[in-house]
Amino acid sequence: MRFWVAGAAGLVFAIASLWLMTRSPPSPWTPVVLLVPMLAVAATGAWRSGQRAGSVVAGAAALALALLVAQGSALRPEQILLAEHVTIHIALALSFGSSLLPDAQPLITRAAERLHGALTPAKERYTRQLTLAWTVYFVAMAIVSIALYASLPFRAWALYANVGTPLGLAAMFAGESWLRHRLHPEFEPSTLRDMIGAFRQSFRALPSDGGSNR
């Protein structure tokens, strides 16, 4: 039930964000209204996951954004929103991509072990490839974001950021689920709640062992 409520809240926020970006009168406070709640959620999630540094950074970013606008930032609101969208995707790409380094364990492999226990070599290869796929996906989303902002009206970019981004994320999850059931039906079924919990534990474990294999 909680995930349905969260999904509904996310949909309402996406619609409100699109309206603020494209229909409301231009205001330098628009990025604050849109981004500070997101940064607050990110700070809370990072703190609960044991990522104290990430939580502090997200909280500081929210405060810095408010101060920047209050003091009359030279950046246009559209540029701030673009920077936020690109930064989130690059940060996610770095989180997933850094776990593919030789002395690290792929993030999705780590999460899968927490859900299913020891993995077979075939499952380890699959989860490594999946980690790479998510890394490429996040980089591609950032590149598309910049390209759309540079080449099309801002309304097109706003539609991509608020509608295309969540739809792309849902498509990645659905496509991966379909592919996993075809290639590795032996993977035990798991709920979205289980997967989110496994990822949170995996992120929490990263600082303690430097991303080592075990």
Image: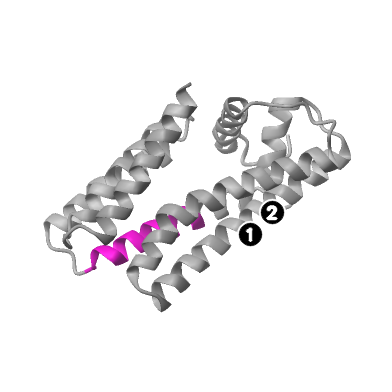
CB atoms of marks 1 and 2 within 8 Å: yes
Residue 178 screen position, x and y as percent: 74, 42
Q: Name the residue at 20% across, 57% down.
A: 24
From the viewer's perspective, tell me whether residue 28 is left or right of residue 41.
left
Q: Among all residues in the image, which is located at the extreme top?
A: 1
Residue designated by label 2: 132
The answer for how far apart the CA atoms under marks 1 and 2 are is 6 Å
Asked whether the viewer can see residue 198, the reply is yes
Q: Is residue 104 visible?
A: no
Q: In which quarter of the image is the C terminus?
A: top right
- Is residue 200 depicted above or below 177 in this figure? above
Q: In which quarter of the image is residue 18?
A: bottom left
SS category of the residue bearing label 1? helix
The residue that mark 1 highlights is 136
Magenta part of the protein: which range? 75-90
Q: Is residue 115 magenta?
A: no
**Residue drawn at (49%, 49%) of the image:** 166
Left or right placement of residue 167 versus residue 29 in this view: right
**Tag 1: amino acid:** Val
From the viewer's perspective, is residue 34 above or below residue 193? below
